[in-house]
Amino acid sequence: MFIMATWRPKQDIWLIGTAIGLLCCKSDNYEIYLAVSKNPSLEPRKFLVGLKKDWLFYQQRDVYTYSSGINDLVSYHFLPEGYGFLIKKGEPVYIKVGAVNLTINPLEYDAFCNLYYTLA
């Protein structure tokens, strides 16, 4: 589990959505997680609980079978119209990623996150 990226807006914004991609080999057996958060903490690390709390947006992919298509790999999350998370100028937003490997094989995966916002 690690912080993949930290973003600080240059002015006040409303964070309104995200696109999250969790990609891996089709024959692997593990779980991939990505969280967008204002909290940099990764604790507690056991069972990746640090990713599963204090998040603004979250995506989990359990890889136990072949992908069923693009919607299984990339997900879009948007708040209802008129809502958003206020992020102040210079306030950090953390993109946190982790994986649980249930096999003895090394795992290879890729994760990406696009943030959608409007000016405050």
Image: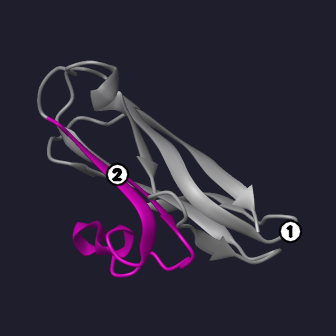
Magenta highlight range:
34-63
Q: Where's residue 4, x and y in %? A: 58, 54
- Residue displayed at 16% across by 35% down: 29
Q: Where's residue 16, x and y in %? A: 57, 58
Magenta-colored stretch includes residue 7: no
Q: Secondary structure at mark 1?
A: loop
Count of all numbered marks drawn on residues in the image: 2
Identity of the amino acid at label 1? Gln
Compared with residue 20, is residue 98 higher up or lower down, i.e. above or below? below
Closer to the camera, 57 or 25?
57
Closer to the camera, 87 or 93?
87
Q: Is residue 21 left or right of residue 16?
A: left
Q: Residues within 10 Å of mark 1 (few under 14, many from 20)?
A: few
Q: Tag 1 or tag 2, which sits nearer the N-term?
A: 1
Residue 59 disc label = 2
Identity of the amino acid at label 2? Gln
- Residue displayed at 21% across by 29% down: 28
Quarter of the figure that contains the N terminus: bottom left
- Foreground mark, 2 or 1, reads 1
Report how far apart the C-alphas of labels 2 and 1 lie in the structure.
27 Å
Q: Where's residue 105, x and y in %? A: 23, 35
Q: Where's residue 60, x and y in %? A: 28, 50
Q: Is residue 12 left or right of residue 114?
A: right
Q: Is residue 90 left or right of residue 70?
A: right
* Disc 1: which residue: 11
Quarter of the figure that contains the C terminus: bottom right
Residue 3 disc label = none
Compared with residue 6, is residue 60 higher up or lower down, i.e. above or below? above
- Residue displayed at 82% across by 74% down: 90
Compared with residue 118, is residue 70 higher up or lower down, i.e. above or below? above
Q: Secondary structure at mark 2?
A: strand
Which quarter of the picture shows residue 54? Answer: bottom left
